[in-house]
Amino acid sequence: MSTILVLPGDGIGKEVCEQAVNVLAWFNDTYQLNLKIESDLVGGAAFDAYGVPLRDETMQAAHNAKAILLGAVGGPQYDNVERDKRPEAALLALRKELDLFANLRPAIVFDPLVDASSLKPEIIKGLDILILRELTAGVYFGLPRGISTLDDGSRTAVDSCTYSEFEISRIADVAFDLARKRQKRVHSVEKANVMETGVLWRDVVSERQQKIATDIDLQHMLADNCSMQLLKHPHQFDVILTDNLFGDMLSDTAAMLTGSLGMLPSASLSGKNAEGKQAAMYEPVHGSAPDIAGQNKANPLATILSLSMMMRYSLDRIDLADNLDKAVNDILNDGLRTFDTATEKDSPSSCSEVGQAVIDKLKNNKE
Ligand code: NAD
């Protein structure tokens, strides 16, 4: 039996995870997946209960689990908590400790939602981009960092962006692997014009392509240009390979192509160890959305689609992942929308109605 550890976290994380867990439980019962679904507190919820955002017991459970499903962490009530006890510290610790260096963020425009984007339908119709973000290095982890006071009493702040050759080459290899199963195109994105990490990034990615991926069309692009190109001509992209900071920003831009942050799933994967075990965490790209938390109106589809990625990458059930993706497309085709993707003519459904509709559709499609 394998364990799936569910960490709902804060705000809408709890609401969207509840719907995703219902879907997972349905799959588990219907297809005898032999999964044990366990749940624990993380982020602000763990801080409130235990005084820390991530307990050692939870980290141990994360190590033991086949995969983790995480909702979201954070909220304004924790803004003044010291940095290492902030909800986000739990996320960074999980990513770092499990070595989840490869963050896969697909941005897919579902046909029925083509009008939900603020971009023209002809620009985004049929879009299917995969953003691969390096997740355990770069400016969010580099040292030194901090705020200090100078002799004249004024303050100064520093964040360090560091990348080793190893960190760049292993994420490049993942990008080439993923591209090989798609359209065989990789855009590697950095700021080699002004950043040393960008120069090294460009060199190492080119070297890896020459060594292991001459079948892949590799292009280099500056991050600022990439953000513009994503809005101007997104169909030119297949896999976008980029660092931690640029990946964070570019994937939010890509979110708006798809219509809503509420539609974007993600997977964070480690390498495989000697026994072939790979740590994996699946989560929606969005945060805890305090502005709508507790109202049962959040879009649960980013989390439900994260489950589909779990079936694809951790459970080896591509067939079930395809079934789930189809069920999501079908309910959208039926006109079911939460408020974030609804147009003026739709009456929005609640988070739990959308979750239940996915299960009903899965049942129907199976019969
Ligand atoms: P957010 O993603 O929580 O929300 C941004 C906007 O998108 C809000 O207007 C929100 O209502 C909307 N939105 C987000 N998810 C939605 C969904 N599923 N359905 C409908 N609308 C949705 O980002 P934020 O407001 O910048 O951050 C809020 C908190 O979340 C902060 O504490 C931040 O640190 C945290 N955060 C956590 C994660 C994470 O846990 N991975 C990621 C981003 C932000």
Image (spheres, rainbow, N blue to C red):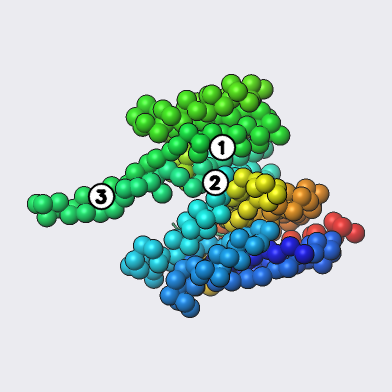
Horizontal relation, residue 206 to residue 149: left or right: right
Dot 1 and dot 2 residues touching (CB under 8 Å): yes
Task: Identify which residue, 105 or 32, lies in the foreground.
Answer: 32
Say which mark, if any, is on residue 205: none
Which numbered mark, 2 or 3, is in the foreground of this view? 2
Task: Identify which residue, 306 or 124, lies in the foreground.
Answer: 306
Q: CA distance from mark 2 to mark 3?
A: 26 Å
Please state the horizontal and vertical placement of residue 311, each as a whole percent of the image. 73, 53
Q: Is mark 2 within 8 Å of ligand 1?
A: no
Q: Pick the quarter of the image with the N terminus.
A: bottom right
Q: CA distance from mark 1 to mark 2?
A: 9 Å
* Residue at figure coordinates x 37%, y 41% from the top left: 161
Say which mark, if any, is on residue 157: 3
Q: Which residue is mark 2?
A: 101
Say which mark, if any, is on residue 170: 1
- The mark nearer the N terminus, 3 or 1, is 3
Q: Pick the quarter of the image with the C terminus.
A: bottom right
Q: Is mark 1 within 8 Å of ligand 1?
A: no
Dot 2 and dot 3 residues touching (CB under 8 Å): no
* Residue at figure coordinates x 53%, y 62% from the top left: 72
Q: Amino acid at mark 1?
A: Arg
Whether residue 349 is visible here, answered yes or no, is: no
The local crowd at label 1, few if under 14, some if 14 to 19, many if 20 or more residues have their Cα within 10 Å, is some
Q: Is residue 288 above or below residue 315?
A: below
The local crowd at label 2, few if under 14, some if 14 to 19, many if 20 or more residues have their Cα within 10 Å, is many
**Res 284 → quadrant:** bottom right
- The mark nearer the N terminus, 2 or 3, is 2
